[in-house]
Amino acid sequence: MAKVATPEVVLIGYQDQGNLGMGYLAAVLKEHGRTVELIDVRDGPQRIAARLAAAQPLVVGFSLIFQFFLPQFRQVATELRQVGVTSHFTMGGHYASLCHDELLPQMPELDSVVRYEGEHTLVELVEHLASGTDWRSTPGLAFLSDERVTENPARPLIQDLDSLPFPYRPHEPEQIVGFPTVPLLASRGCARRCSFCSIHTFYRTAPGKTVRVRKAEKVIEEMLLLHREQGARVFLFQDDDFPLWGRAGRKWVDELAERMHETGLAERVIWKISCRAEYVEAELFSKLREAGLFLVYMGIESGVEAGLEILHKQLSVEQNLAGVQILKDVGVHFMYGFMLFDPSSTFDSVRDNIGFLRQIVGDGSSAATFCRMLPYGGTPIRDQLRLEGRLRGGVTRPDYDFLDQRLTDYYRQLKPVSGQWVSDEGVSHELHWAWDEFTTVSRLAPGLTGEEEYRRALTALTAASNEALFRLVEDSAAAFEQGDTTLLDPAAARATCEDVRTRLVDLRNGFFLDNVAALTEAVRLTAIRGPVLAPQVH
């Protein structure tokens, strides 16, 4: 936990790969002369309370990513109140902004909610509290008044993202095989309207332009700074949808790639983006690969047209297949999001989806993964499920039944078995990490001993793991449909995954042990970094 003597503002949230939302809030507050401390919510209620009981900041802000973590944040807030922290408690984020009418009554420790983009709202709130004036007049806030929810007028979205300072980054960068890795943003907002996602409702509900893109020269300037000061070699663009769309997007990304080469970044760093399959073009992505692009995450979500329709993805199965194939052809690794189960699912769609996954990753090009669509607060699909009378569970654990009750029963029994692969602790997650490591070192330390042999072996192991998962789902779904549940055997799945895990550890250890000297030298050169050209401002 970072040590700040007497912070005026404390922001609490998850700090995985840094938290750019909190980083921007802190940077703007610091620009206005405020002292700020960032705390990871996983430090736990007692540790956080021990820190803040003496500090008594003006404001404690909670950055809630998903509503499922609300009980964890409530535990921290409750503990802080119990030890006598009298600070103003506020919360921001997608769920808090869109569902403040649900949030405020069930979390009485909160004094307010900061809705939508919070940089200017939080600054004004702190100024009111510091001066003793009435904070309730602050635009962008929601709060309880006489047990009724009051919404102040929404503050417009920030139109010029380059007017913001670079985010505050007090923590050391995370590393992949010794190479410092940092998150970055080129834009805010998403132009699409996926029914399961709260991102577009978050940005469309607030006044102002939904999608805003930073100038390419400012993105390069930040990358250069992070490369010089923190030795950053891997950049993870966390844009909801990297700005590739249309003529304007193509012009912007062409400029970004050109400036990567002009400044020498293309030879020194690699970077990852998230985008839709329809934006993946061979010529463009070959150019981006040459500029350092090494990983693309795509929200594919479904391999059947009915699933894409209910999720309102606004693209086709063929477009998803084409996007994956182009990435394979140009040599850019990919990962993907996939919802094997959604409210329209049937046993037939589950089998068709597995067939689709076999098409894209049956060759071992990426580890197989999938999940069930969850009805997040503030999403159109949650509203639709409520109208249909299918919404189940509480605020923090929303759920729904499938139209075929047998499929509901099947999913409940499949989840702990397939979780041996697709959970955060599953073997597919470990295979993803192995691929991240390998694609990183193959780009930043090329020519390693046994590189192609390791690639082939990792591909074969990934393919074998994927096929075991695919066959499990296919066979168990067919059997379950006929009333046979014996194929859903957690012990057998665990044994299969442990075998994959053991083989992965042996394979990985052998490759990295053979290349200790070369990787040590490559990481050492990271610390030296050397001169990099300043960006040309036009």
Image: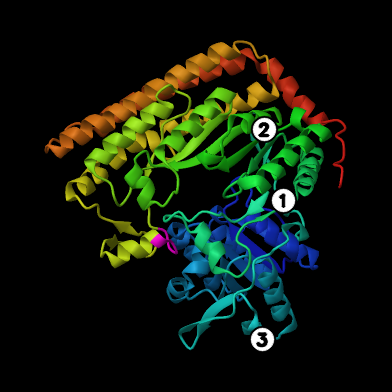
Q: Position of residue 67 (x, y in %)?
A: 45, 60
Question: Is 93 displayed left or right of 161 in the figure?
Answer: left
Given the image, on which type of amino acid does mark 1 rest?
Answer: Arg
Majority secondary structure in the magenta region: loop
- Residue at (24, 44) in percent of width and height: 346
What numbered label is drawn on residue 169? 1
Q: Position of residue 389 (x, y in %)?
A: 25, 65
Q: Position of residue 165 (x, y in %)?
A: 77, 57
Q: Residues within 10 Å of mark 2 (few under 14, many from 20)?
A: many
* Number of numbered markers: 3
Q: Is residue 341 visible?
A: no
Given the image, on which type of amino acid does mark 2 rest?
Answer: Leu
Q: Nearer the viewer, residue 50 or 489?
A: 489
Q: CA distance from mark 1 to mark 3?
A: 32 Å
Mark 3–mark 2 contact, CB under 8 Å?
Answer: no
Task: Report the residue marked by disc 2.
Answer: 288
Q: Nearer the viewer, residue 245 or 394?
A: 245
Q: Nearer the viewer, residue 450 or 9?
A: 450
User: Does residue 379 show up magenta in the picture?
Assistant: yes
Given the image, on which type of amino acid does mark 3 rest?
Answer: Asp
